[in-house]
Image (spheres, helix red, strand yellow):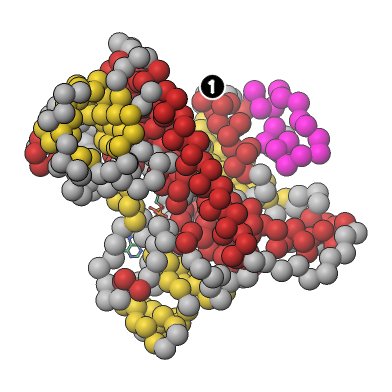
Amino acid sequence: MADDEFDLFVIGGGSGGVRASRLAANLGLKVGIAEEFRLGGTCVIRGCIPKKLMVFASDYANKFSESEGFGWQLKSPSFSWVKFSNSMRSEIDRLEDVYKNILSSSGVEIFKQKATIHSKSSVILDDGVIYKAKYILLATGGTPSKLKIKGEKLAITSNEIFALRSLPKTLTIIGGGYIACEFASIFNGLGTKVTLVYRGEMILRGFDHDIRDQVDRVMRSNGVVIKNNTEIISIDKVEDSLAVDFSNGDKQFSEQVLLAVGRQARTEGLGLDRVNMCLTKSGAIQVDEFQKTSVASIYAVGDITDRFNLTPVAIRDAAAFVKTVFEGERTPSDHHLIPTAVFTRPEVGTVGLTEEEAKASHRTKTFKTLFSPMGNRLSKKAEKVFMKLLVCSDSDKVLGCHMVGEGASEIIQVFGIAIKMGAKKSDLDATCAVHPTLAEELVTLS
Ligand code: NDP
């Protein structure tokens, strides 16, 4: 047992863990953090950030062709996966350094190894050293779910996709959620022939039905083959290809298979049994509104709690944890009205209730529009923008806002403020439009 006692020991150096460590250290507390892989976690190393860089790379394909309508002439542009991957890797390395420096300059002691719970008030590192800690924060995130089918190991997950050595000519994606749909759009844009295979009726379950319909329609017209109501049975290697067998008897050959069938809390091997930690039905760490687990000295934030598995939520929960535990200000996590985006092409931005949810709980007025953005005439792009507002007939409050199309993620971030402040439809009507923009439609809907 080491002599040192930490005020806080954080296990997991992703978005939530890093934020909590830094904030606690800035209060003058003695803080340690252990990360067995790379600082930055899923978001920075193999999630949001590299994914968005891929989205940017993929978007150029259309921009080149669209520019012709505006008078540009280009000799056939070509894309180098290797060059792009190298640039992406350098950027990730840079960000990892930024994270490391933020922690070091705040005085957080970094342990680049695995740590597990040793007792209610101590952790043990891989090298066998035990550290006492007044509080332990679990922030190890999540990991891609497995399917337990024959040949599963032949497929990749979002953990491996950023490290592909070459751009696959053909890609089969299993799943119909955020990750499946985003990578379908990205690789389709980069020139890969993509087949997305989903077990349900329509991709993006849980989103507003019009949003799902619009994304499905445009993704198909962009060239993604979508097969609904299809379950995967097995994967086999056949010469240079992977052959995927489906429940309906179909077989699909492709160079790569991406499994994007959800994520689960990363709790394995954390030593939870040593403290009889209570878990949720899905195997995540059970926490109360203050991020406290069933063990009074142990807290958890982020995807390991499997609530809203989004980086900004983990960061906010980490800040709320520090305020509650170290600043004496009991701060519950606020998970109401979380705006979110899906970086498909077309992009989705959404906040609040879906039409189905709104109608089940309120007398609801629906306002929607489907229109061609101004630039599309010249670029000869057929894609339209869809917007929908759900308004309570009794209070006039906006209950939900859903968008598909260019800029949806940016617009919904700002609209999230309005809806959080309790905006009414009359407030939107009273707001002057900015012309000519896409977002002005939101204040002129009638
Ligand atoms: P999601 O939960 O979004 O989607 C999982 C998909 O896999 C669903 O379509 C689900 O089908 C399907 N599925 C689940 N089990 C099986 C099975 N046994 N066989 C076939 N299909 C199956 O998970 P993702 O992995 O896409 O993403 C994980 C989380 O990460 C997201 O929920 C989100 O919180 C976060 N994320 C956020 C992003 C963003 O903010 N832009 C981007 C990427 C991830 P069904 O619908 O029928 O259940």
Looking at the image, which is closer to me, 273 or 406?
273
Ligand 1 location (quadrant): bottom left
In percent of the image, x 35 and y 74: which residue is there?
Answer: 154
Q: Is residue 277 above or below residue 68?
A: above
Looking at the image, which is closer to me, 397 or 340?
340
Q: Is residue 390 above or below residue 380?
A: above
- Classify residue 412 as left or right of residue 245: right
The answer to whether residue 211 shows anywhere in this view is no
**Residue that badge 1 annotates:** 421
The quarter of the picture where the N terminus appears is top left
The answer to whether residue 16 shows anywhere in this view is yes
In percent of the image, x 56 and y 26: which residue is there?
Answer: 417
Q: Quadrant of residue 412?
A: top right
In percent of the image, x 80 and y 49: which residue is there?
Answer: 374
Residue 332 pos. (x, y %): 33, 22
* Range shown magenta: 426-443
Q: Quadrant of residue 381?
A: bottom right
